[in-house]
Image (spheres, rainbow, N blue to C red):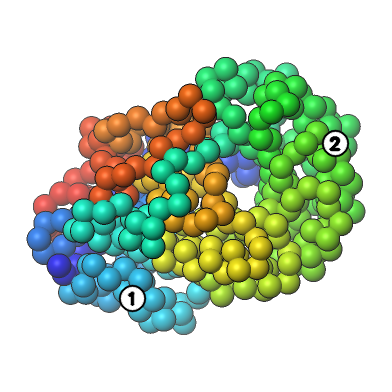
Amino acid sequence: MKITDVRAAGLRGATPEGGWTEELQPDDVVHTLVAVHTDGGNVGVGSVFTSENLVRAALEVLRPLLIGENALEPERVAEKLHRTTFWLGRGGSVTHTISGIDSAMWDLLGRATGQPVGRLLGGRYRDRVRPYASLLMDRPDRLVERLRPLADAGWAAFKIGWGPFGRISNQLDEQIITAARETVGPDALLMVDAGASDGAWSQGYKWALRAAAMLAEHDVVWFEEPLPPDALEDYVRLREHSPVAVAGGEVLTRRQSFLPWIESGALDIVQPDVTKVGGISELRRIGWNAHDHGVRLIPHGWNTAVGLATDLQIASALPDTDLVEYVTGSPYIDDLLTTEWSLDSDGMLAIPEGPGLGIELDLDSVSRYADVETLLGPAR
């Protein structure tokens, strides 16, 4: 099975808010679907966390390296792409785009063999996983209005992030966390994301240590991105002294970038994003390296339905990955597939057992947000 083409189509019209200083608008494109086409007419799909224009530009470089390649050898081909393009800047839009290509090729391999990707990665440790509802923070009254329906609907894990936290006052920070804990109840998992990768973030180590102590009083499971993403030494110190687990790594790409963070003990929980880290092939390597150092991998997943399906397959194949991120209220997650995601009575999400990523795109739904003909149509 040979690769004949690779195409991209950005999602626009319903882009959720990101909490960034320069806030996203519905027509901004930060999620792009990638399709790898083969000579037998088979197509694999992946997701990329970057703009359509940047993905298309990267494909101008990557496409000649892909045409004619064996579509059933994702890890080898992805490594070829990384090595051939390293001089263009490892970790940027080229790496993000390779992420979608790699995941699409794993999808193809699964479809060709009739197996879910998780089994092809070495075996399934679980057939369901707990998703955590991921939503932006707000002032206490408005946050409660968003959390309560989710708790009533059966969600048992929540991550609240960004918004005013760490940006106005310590008093407001604690009011937000108090309101969240009271709303979701004492038994729910509650995680907090400071969003210190925001370009306008101004807090440092001493604030993070104080905030961690406050979060521990409310039984918060982990404190995510409490420090700027390059503050490695401060992360090491914080992890040593924080009473709650420290999580981060969503901005890092390629396995090489994660090594100093894992080996220096900077994180309790490492959070690569499969849609930009280099794809399934890279994320699996990071996961096993983390496991060998006593660090959990919980993937960052501000994502699409295709990205979520990818995270679920990874969660099935790594022993410590027992949670996945689910951005609530996003049509790019809820509306793109022929079957809906649904929680079971335990608040868990079934990991698809079908071949490849185990999903099928609803083309009518996808067409509301992307150019389906460009992505999946006949050869051009």
Q: Amino acid at mark 1?
A: Arg
Image coordinates of residue 200 in percent, x first then y, are 73, 50
Q: Residue 162, how many percent across, how many down?
A: 68, 40
Where is residue 113, by image quadrant? bottom left
Label 1 neighbour load within 10 Å: few <14, some 14-19, many 20+: few
Q: Which residue is at a point 39% across and 62% down the rendered structure image? A: 122
Label at residue 76: 1
Q: Quadrant of the C terminus?
A: bottom left
The residue that appears at 57% across and 41% down in the rendered structure is 18
316 with respect to 223 (left or right): left
Q: Is residue 113 visible?
A: yes
Q: Where the N terminus falls, by quadrant?
A: bottom left
Q: Which residue is mark 2?
A: 217
Compared across the picture, whether 195 is left or right of 178 comes to left
Label 2 Cα neighbours within 10 Å, binned few <14 / some 14-19 / many ≥20: few
The three-letter amino acid code for the residue at tag 2 is: Glu
